[in-house]
Image (cartoon, rainbow, N blue to C red):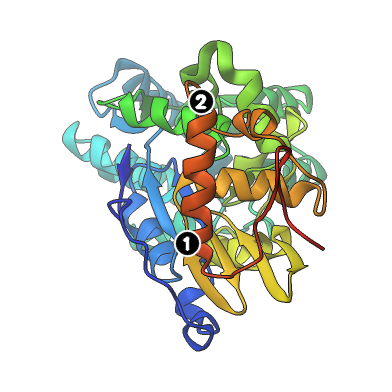
Amino acid sequence: MTDRTGGTRRTVITAAALAEPTASLSGYTIGVTADRRRDELANLLESRGARVVLAPALRIVPIADDAELRAATRACLDAPPDIVLVNTGIGMRGWLEAAEGWGLAEPLRAVLSQAYLVARGPKARAAIRSAGLHDQWSPEGESYEEVVDHLKSRGIAGLTVAMQLHGESQPEYTEALEQAGARVVEVPVYRWAAPTDPAPLHRLVDLITARLVDAVTFTAAPAVQALLRAAGPSSEAVLEALRSDVLAACVGPVTAAPLRRHNVPVVAPHRARLSALVRTIVDELPKRAVTLEVAGHSLTLRGHAAIVDGELRPLAPAPMAVLRALATTPGRVLSRAALLHALPRGADEHAVEMAVARLRAGLSAPGVIQTVVKRGYRLPV
């Protein structure tokens, strides 16, 4: 795991500064599972004040010399497809580059120029046009379902459809096209592989299950399964966290589909763009914040920080865990033993006392954390 902030900042953010767009995600920790564009996404999140945890779930491995790609290319040249579905820009460029290496670029470009080209998104469209080709149609929502419905409505019985794969086979869509009477040629241009260093992903699993991240971003559907594989026996705990306390933010509907099959609520922008994904997170995370009026102070819980009377005050994990536990039932006294369950495993009642002391110091708001002699602590209301 790479924590891009270093995890050591405890700077108080004033009310005026907190109102600026650059602080809209201050106090939140967000996991990034992307590999190829992780820095771009991390920079967008950090520019809004978020603490970012980098944990690539997968990496792209080009297969320019792969026998399957060469065979698929030869099949397209021998029996030119009537329809070509271009799923990704990187895939289209990789296909043409591989064909160039085999001396087949021009024959392939000629075949593609005669086909009905479907670009699933803007990057695929840009790759098509940069190759000197012209796309005929793109789905508004950039989903496979729209593509299948569009092609079936056109009538594809007896036609050949070449489908450039998005890292791995999509058998449900291939089968849907074949059931409509089409012959489908799958074109595998790259594969997803495990990250070179799996430790960051395993660490992200721990952070999700401990609710120490507020959101996790996904930019490719296979990253969901990669995360669950990394979780192993903890996969259900990860899903439960994503169903409740940790926001699952996906770049688009294709990426969101595996999570939705696991009954995980997902937020996604209308257009599959990283900038739109960040705006969606900016809109959604603050809605989840808990706000209370305690001892004459306004208190809002935001990720790893509390907003006290308009000022954001970052807190360490243990004090924040105590505050969240107390905020679940304002006014109710929680014993040291009860609060102990909110702390990391291995802690004792002395650790609770230390966490409460650090919490009071961090909040700098007298009376917010009240001691009830011989019983425990509470947030007075």
Which quadrant does the C terminus fall into? bottom right
On the question of residue 308 being in view, the answer is: yes
Q: Which amino acid lies under the numbered mark 1 shown in the image of this protein?
A: Gly
Q: Where is residue 323 in the image (x, y as percent from the top left)?
A: 62, 50
Residue 365 appears at what percent x and percent y? 58, 70
Question: Residue lying furthest bottom in this view?
Answer: 16
Task: Write the residue at 30% across / 16% down.
Answer: 67
Q: Are marks 2 and 1 in contact (CB under 8 Å)?
A: no
Quadrant including the N terminus: top left
Give the spatial CA distance, label 2 vs label 1. 21 Å
215 versus 224 height, above or below: below
Direction front: furthest residue: 373
Q: Residue placed at 28% from the left, 20% from the top?
A: 66
Label number found at residue 348: 2
* Total numbered circles: 2
Residue 303 lies, in percent from the top left, at: 56, 54
Residue 282 is situated, as x and y percent measured from the top left of the image, at 59, 67
226 lies above or below 219 = above
- Say whether residue 165 is visible: no
**10 Å crowding of disc 2: few (<14), some (14-19), many (20+):** some
The residue that label 1 is drawn on is: 362
